[in-house]
Image: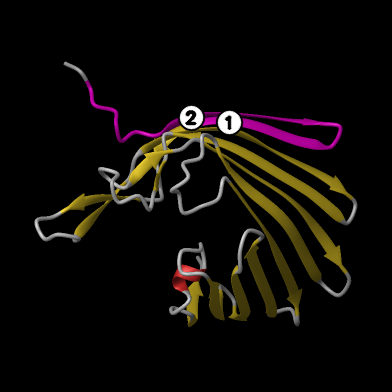
Amino acid sequence: PSRKLSNSNYGLRLSTLSNGWDISGFAYSSMDISPTFYRDAVSSPGTFIYEARHDRIHQYGGTLAKDFGSVVLKGEAVYTRGRKFNVLRLSDADGVVPQNTLDWALGLDFTLPADTRLNVQVFERDYFSHDPDLISDKRESGYSLLINHKLTDRLEAQAMWIASLNRTDWLFRPRVTWNFEKNWRLAVGADVFKGQQLGLFGRYDGNDRVYSEVRYSF
C-alpha cells in the first residue's frame, strides 16, 4: 500500500568553515509555517469567507558569517517555491496566486563599549513573475536596527526598529529584562505598529500592546 507523506518535513544541510568564513547551504521541503488565506464566495452577494491553509513549500538557500574582530558579518538567501499570496483581484477564483520568491538579508553585529551590542540589517524579498494585483511590490525592501545594553549584571535593555523602504510601515519594540533570581527572568516590553492598512506592520496599527512575562528556566 502507498504511504501518504504530504505532511512530512525533510531536508538536507551542508556546512563548511574556510579561512574564517562559516558557509552553509540547504534544501528543505515542509508545510509552510505561515498560513495562506484562500477565499470562497458564499450565497450572499459580495460576501466572502476565508480559509487558512498551510501549503507545502520547497526552499533552497545558504548562509554565511565572518568575524572581523569586533564586527561580525552575517548573510542569508532563500529561494522559495510553492507558496501562494493573496491578490486584490475579486475575479480570481480563490483570491491567491502562486509566486516564487527570493529572500535575502545582510547584517552587521557591532560589539561596542560598556556591554553594548548593535545590529544593523538590510533585507529584501523579490517576486518572480510578479502579479500586478499582489498587495506587495515586485521588490520589497527594508532595514532593521537593534541595540542591546547591559545596565547591570542582572538588568538589560534593548530596542528594535524594523521599517519598510517601500512605504511608511514600521515596528518599534523596546524591552527590559531583569534576572531577579537564579533561573528566574522578568521581561517588560511594548510593540508599536505604524503604517498603511495593507502594510506588513500597518495592518496592526490599532493593536499596539504592552506586555510582561515571567520565565523560569531549568
- Secondary structure predominantly adopted by residues drawn in magenta: strand
Residue 150 x/y as whole percent: 75, 76
Taking depth in this image into account, of 132 and 210 the one nearest to the observer is: 132
The residue depicted at 18 percent of the width and 52 percent of the height is: 41
The amino acid type found where label 1 is placed reads Phe
The residue depicted at 68 percent of the width and 75 percent of the height is: 158
| Residue at numbered disc 1 | 26
* Residue 150, numbered label: none
Tell me where the magenta segment starts and ends, as one range: 3-28
How many residues crowd mark 2 within 10 Å: few (<14), some (14–19), many (20+)? Answer: few
108 sits left or right of 79 in the view: right
How many residues crowd mark 1 within 10 Å: few (<14), some (14–19), many (20+)? Answer: some
User: Residue 198 in magenta?
Assistant: no
Residue 66 x/y as whole percent: 81, 43
The amino acid type found where label 2 is placed reads Gly
- The answer to whether 171 is drawn above or below residue 88 in the figure is below
The residue depicted at 53 percent of the width and 75 percent of the height is: 193
- The answer to whether 133 is drawn above or below residue 151 in the figure is above
* Residue 11, numbered label: 2
